[in-house]
Image: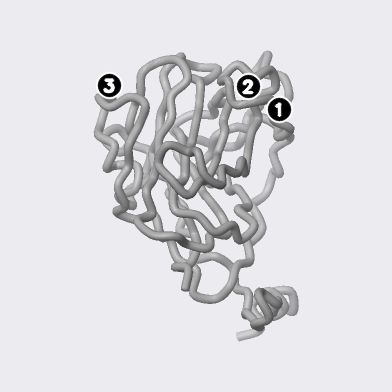
């Protein structure tokens, strides 16, 4: 079987991290089945990124990177979700069908994933809701060394253009939810806790999570 030269390049790329040569490989992301056709742009949504119109390219990370959030504890600003339970956010089920997502109350809400030890993380992948093309508001992703987000807090993604969520103004653009989820480059940050914030969507004031994956490796 002939392998495309680009694929050969992707699977053999090597980088230097802390003086060590690490082979880079595409993350082993498994996507759920699409639940709607195309990526239509919702009306009257400002600061919206243009859909790629094609599959997202592979994301390269050091060999051995896995979803270190699978089965890890989840807490939330809404301790009693309207639909589902918080454990579903890291249970590995991301079909997006009824019964596979969590609904949090309206307004600014957050979820925190405890990786239970420090990890080097390379990417965070989140599916809020992908049964239809929605745009969630004020999406912010942060990491920290403690559950109260006091020590070594770093913001990896923020598309809140007017500080409506109260975590500062972000520079990223809003995006349409699809079965691909939103992939956020974590740039090899060393951390234990991951916090995701949202503030409803263009379709509903409630907040939703189908699944969150955090790709990385235990910190040695």
Q: Is residue 183 above or below residue 75?
A: below
Q: Which residue is mark 1?
A: 48
Residues at marks 3 and 2 touching, judged by CB atoms closer than 8 Å:
no
Q: Which residue is mark 3?
A: 82
Q: Is residue 21 above or below residue 30?
A: below
Q: Residue furthest bottom?
A: 1
Mark 3 residue element: loop
Residues at discs 1 and 2 in contact (Cβ within 8 Å) = yes
Tell which of 37 and 88 is nearer to you: 88
Q: Position of residue 121 (x, y in %)?
A: 53, 59
Foreground mark, 3 or 1, reads: 3
Q: State which quadrant residue 20 falls in.
A: bottom right
Could you tell me how far apart the alpha carbons at marks 3 and 1 are, in whole angstroms?
Answer: 28 Å
Q: Relative to 215, does residue 42 appear above or below in the rendering?
A: above
Q: Residue at x 60, y 37 (%)?
A: 38
Residue that mark 2 sits on: 42
Which one is nearer the viewer's eye here, 189 or 85?
189
Q: Position of residue 218 (x, y in %)?
A: 44, 68
Residue 12: give x, y in percent of width and height: 67, 82
């Amino acid at each position: 079987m002939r392998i495309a030269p680009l694929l050969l390049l992707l699977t053999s790329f090597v980088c230097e991290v802390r003086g060590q040569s690490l082979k880079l490989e595409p993350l082993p992301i498994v996507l759920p089945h699409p639940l709607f056709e195309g990526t239509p742009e919702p009306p009257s949504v400002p600061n919206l990124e243009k859909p790629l119109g094609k599959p997202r390219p592979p994301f390269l990370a050091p060999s051995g990177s896995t979803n270190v959030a699978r089965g890890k504890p989840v807490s939330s600003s809404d301790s009693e979700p309207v639909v589902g339970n918080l454990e579903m956010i890291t249970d590995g089920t991301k079909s997006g069908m009824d019964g596979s997502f969590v609904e949090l109350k309206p307004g600014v809400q957050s979820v925190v994933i405890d990786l239970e030890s420090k990890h080097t993380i390379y990417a965070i992948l989140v599916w809020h809701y992908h049964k239809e093309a929605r745009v969630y508001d004020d999406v912010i992703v942060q990491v920290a060394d403690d559950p109260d987000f006091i020590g070594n807090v770093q913001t990896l993604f923020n598309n809140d253009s007017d500080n409506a969520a109260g975590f500062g103004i972000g520079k990223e653009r809003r995006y349409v939810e699809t079965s691909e989820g939103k992939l956020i480059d974590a740039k090899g940050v060393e951390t234990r806790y991951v916090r995701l914030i949202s503030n409803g969507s263009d379709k509903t004031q409630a907040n939703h999570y189908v699944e969150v994956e955090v790709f990385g490796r235990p910190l040695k």
